[in-house]
Image (cartoon, rainbow, N blue to C red):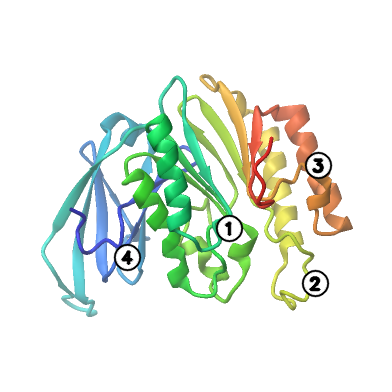
Amino acid sequence: MLSTIMKCTPAVCAVKDEYQIMIPVNASAVMWIKVGGKTFYDESNGILRSDTDIHRITVPMSVLDHAKEYTVYWREVFERKPYSPVLGETQDQTFVFRPMKSDTVRAYMISDTHGMYEQPIAAAEKFLELYGEIDLLILNGDILSNSGDSANFILYYRIIEKLTGGEIPVIISRGNHDLRGKCAEKLCEYMPVEHGNSYYTIRMGNIWAILLDLGEDKEDEHKEYNGTICCHAFRERETEFFENVVKNEKNEYNAEGVEHRIVISHVPFTRCDMAPDAKESPLFKKWVELLNDQIDPEFVLSGHTHWQYI
């Protein structure tokens, strides 16, 4: 039975060579995780965080993959006074974990649910009935209808709880509808990021992936936003990141053990009609060239179009 402190089971999210374990909570608490005898904290420069409704605890993939289980510890915070804060007793709950397999991997992707819960869960459960367990869950954008309320963000973790129980890796990609609403600017507090960025690479088992985020599918000046986005500048920074991935002498996508290279992007930028306006087309073209000339991925996983096709 899940502890009442947790809104749902933890989500073990893959970022680079780490797992960011995201844990939504119902009350103020300090929280940490033990894996294989090592302790990892949700902290800010040595201060345990409690003024949050979702905890993020980073664990090296190699450590959790080896241990195959993790224990979440917490103490509820009743009053965080400057001197002698009032906390509850230490409690804990252990979760098993299945790391990425070294042979065939069965991944399941969900995108564009736009605030729905029952329908995507029913579809996923039908898949599980037919084909058995999955090894990786990918939420590829527009899981929310909008970010008008931070309470909407729990939908990510309700779906993850139902389909993983905190036991397998998850990848979360931002969609363009996630950019809409007053809480959109807070989304990086509620989902896995690298140094605050919603784009990064991932290495799990024999898979190397790059997760890209195109932001909105409309131009920055579009009336729906009325001057509240700057996605062109965001994409320019992301292009620099992409170029640096390719220029890196280590060439992580060619590292020993990498057998599969994949791309995850909510918006299918390989389609020329997906560019918000003319000034974005050169950026999209640059991304495609980098993929074709340098990385040569097996496939790109996208959503956004509301059609299922190859």
51 to 96, vertically: above or below: below
Asked where in the image residue 291 lies, by quadrant, the reply is top right
Disc 2 element: loop
Tag 3 residue: 286
Q: Please tell me in which quadrant of the rendered image residue 201 appears.
A: top right
Looking at the rendered structure, the kind of residue marked 3 is Lys
The residue beneath circle 2 is 221
Residue at position x 76%, y 30% in the image:
292
Secondary structure at numbered mark 4: loop
Between residue 216 and residue 50, name the one nearer to us. Answer: 216
Label 1 to label 3: alpha-carbon separation: 25 Å
Name the front one of labels 1 and 2: 1
Please, what secondary structure does the residue beneath circle 3 have? helix
**What type is the residue that disc 4 sits on?**
Arg
Amino acid carrying label 2: it is Glu
Q: Badge 3, how many Cα within 10 Å: few under 14, some, many 20+?
A: some
Q: Name the residue beneath numbered marker 4.
A: 49
Q: Looking at the picture, how far across and down is residue 174, in whole percent?
A: 58, 55
Q: Is residue 15 above or below residue 101?
A: below
Residue sitting at 26 percent across and 49 percent down? 33
Q: Earlier in the sequence, mark 1 or mark 2?
A: 1
299 over 70 or under it: above or below? above
Give whichever of discs 3 and 4 has the lower sequence position.
4
Which numbered disc flags the more N-terminal residue, 1 or 3?
A: 1
Q: Is residue 37 left or right of residue 188?
A: left
| Residue position marked by numbered label 1 in the rendering | 142
Q: Amino acid at mark 1?
A: Asp
- In this rendering, does residue 21 appear at all? no
